[in-house]
Amino acid sequence: MDTLRVAVLGHGEVGRVLAAGLAGKVRLRVYDPVCPEGGDLVARNADAVRGADLVIAVTTGADSLAACAESRPHLKRGALYADLSTGAPGDKRRVAELLEPAGVGVVDGAIMAPVPLRGLATPVLASGAEAGRFAVLAGGLGMSVTPIGGAPGDAAARKLLRSVLVKGLSALVIESQRAAEEAGLGEWFWGHLLETVTAADEEFVVRLLKGAGQHGVRRVHEMEAATRMLEALGVPDTMTRATTATLDEVTRTGIPPVPDPS
């Protein structure tokens, strides 16, 4: 059996890790327009994707459609194009619209953990009609791909919903810890933060939601006071203002439903 021919588009942090893990296992070509030719890198997109059995695109989300359009004329029928960029669901669907009529299988891949920590074994969700085939091919190379069925865009939606939560938490931690430091309470607040996060469970999360619905007006007033405190401390209050606006909206629209665990 011929060695699998794989192209990696994008040679940033993720692309470098994936390329290093794949090297020696496949016939590998790597392309990135901002990187000079050298090693496994080639000078043109066409040189990377022409004849490839599998293309793994790990460009930025902003560049994903351009990479797809550039690749399209050079992809062979039956190839798999796995877009693992952090793009919007609509962008992933557009990739499928561009490539599937040309006989190319399209996979929407969502990388669900930091790649430098686990390399090829980083968990990836895959959606689209070819997700199962991609999981088999990628699994044989040491990747950890879980097919979820559905259509292109479904994996991206899960990734970005996680981003709303995790990156939002990150921004809240930054803003609140800065405020605590300016108030001379940095050490106390850090301990309180860790205690709150490590003790969180489903009951805690449900209480966050239902409490916002039951006590929305009072919590808006509380966050308005918090905003004034951050202003007095000279700390940027972007997240605190956003929290106030969200809680104010909840007083009119209600909270999202809590899923039934059964």
Image (cartoon, rainbow, N blue to C red):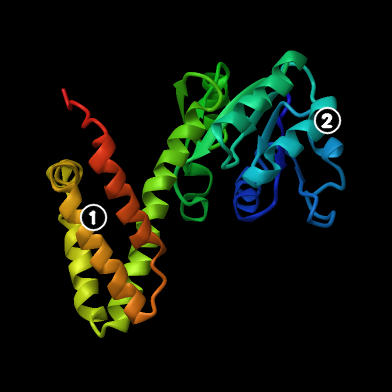
Badge 1 marks a residue whose secondary structure is helix
Please identify the residue farthest to the bottom as the structure is shown.
184
Instruction: Answer few, some or many: residues within 10 Å of disc 2's Cα (few below 14, many 20 plus, some between 14 and 19).
Output: many
Give the number of callouts: 2
Screen quadrant of the C terminus: top left
Give the Cα distance between marks 1 and 2.
Answer: 57 Å
In the drawing, does residue 122 fall left or right of residue 188? right
Where residue 255 sits, quadrant-wise, is top left
Pointer 1 residue: 220
The image shows residue 252, relative to residue 73, as above or below, that is below
Q: Tag 2 or tag 1, which sits nearer the N-term?
A: 2
Task: Name the kind of residue labelled 1 in the image.
Answer: Val
Q: What percent of the width, then of the height, locates residue 219?
A: 19, 55
Secondary structure under badge 2?
A: loop
Q: Is residue 233 left or right of residue 65?
A: left
Using residue 112 as the reference point, say whether residue 247 is left or right of it: left
Q: Residue at x 54, y 28 (%)?
A: 153
Closer-to-camera residue (49/193) = 193
Q: Which mark is residue 50?
A: 2
* Amino acid type for the residue under numbered disc 2: Arg
Does residue 23 appear in this view? Answer: no
Q: Position of residue 68 (x, y in %)?
A: 74, 33
Q: Nearer the viewer, residue 94 or 145?
A: 94
Q: Which residue occupies 57% across, 35% down?
A: 141
Q: Nearer the viewer, residue 174 or 67?
A: 174
x then y, percent, for residue 239: 38, 60
